[in-house]
Amino acid sequence: MTATAARATRRLTPTTFKLLLSLHIVVSVGWLGLNVGNLTLAITGLVTDDPGTQHTAFGAMHLIGGTLLIPVSLLALVSGVLLGLHTRWGLVRYRWVLVKLVLTVVAVVLIPLSLLPGLAELSRLMAGTPADRLADTGPLALDMLAAGLVSTAMYVTSAVLSVLKPWGRTRRVA
């Protein structure tokens, strides 16, 4: 089988491609939305003078992020990899796809290693603080804010790369 024929057998049907692309876009936008929501909650929890608002904001971050971030991020990664494997863009054929892949893998790895433990610790801190008192979050809330800002920049960069498709092809690896 020639290389062209091998590539042709890996192509998706138009309907399958549209479904997979739609899934990838919806899940990726959802991932960005989760992130922006948690970023908004982090800012709210940091700037409020109302203990109830602080407890609600920081508690909701763990409730939302702890439940949804891993499955949504993994679905975005898997659907993106499948699109790369079964379209002309490939996974490492174009620089913009490779950058998106690296950004996504970094985010997927950091969620369970760094973000979720921080959200769980912040939630425990809120649970251990009386409801009528502001919690002393120390640097933890600022860390969650920084994580939200960095991940938002990564996801927006990925979205922009998908539209602009800059930089051309990578060097061919034998």
Image (cartoon, rainbow, N blue to C red):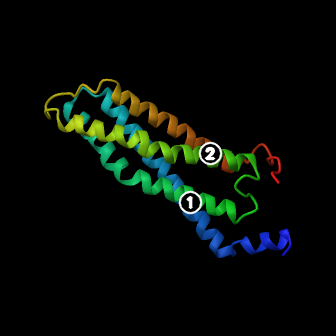
Q: Is residue 59 left or right of residue 117?
A: left
The reply to whether residue 57 is visible in this rendering is: no
Q: Is residue 140 left or right of residue 165?
A: left
The reply to whether residue 132 is visible in this rendering is: yes
Q: Nearer the viewer, residue 137 or 9?
A: 9
Can you tell which mark lies on residue 78? 1
Q: Quadrant of residue 160?
A: top right
Q: Nearer the viewer, residue 7 or 59?
A: 7
Q: Is residue 32 left or right of residue 84?
A: left
Name which of mark 2 and mark 1 comes first in the sequence.
1
Mark 1 nearby-residue class (10 Å; few <14, some 14–19, many ≥20): few
Query: For the point 78% across and 43% down, which residue is it?
Result: 167
The three-letter code of the residue at mark 2 reads Val
The three-letter code of the residue at mark 1 reads Val
| Image coords of residue 158 (percent x, y) | 61, 46
Q: Nearer the viewer, residue 110 or 141?
A: 110
Q: Do labels 2 and 1 touch, CB within 8 Å?
A: no
Q: Quadrant of residue 118?
A: top left
Query: For the point 61% across and 41% down, which residue is it?
Result: 157
> Which residue bears the numbered disc 2?
102
Quadrant of the image containing the C terminus: bottom right
Q: Is residue 33 above or below residue 15?
A: above
Q: Residue furthest front?
A: 174
Query: For the point 53% across and 54% down, which residue is it?
Result: 28
| Image coords of residue 97 (percent x, y) | 69, 50
Quadrant of the image containing the N terminus: bottom right
Q: Is residue 19 above or below residue 132?
A: below
| Image coords of residue 165 (percent x, y) | 73, 48
Q: Is residue 123 above or below residue 165?
A: above
**Dot 1: what SS?**
helix
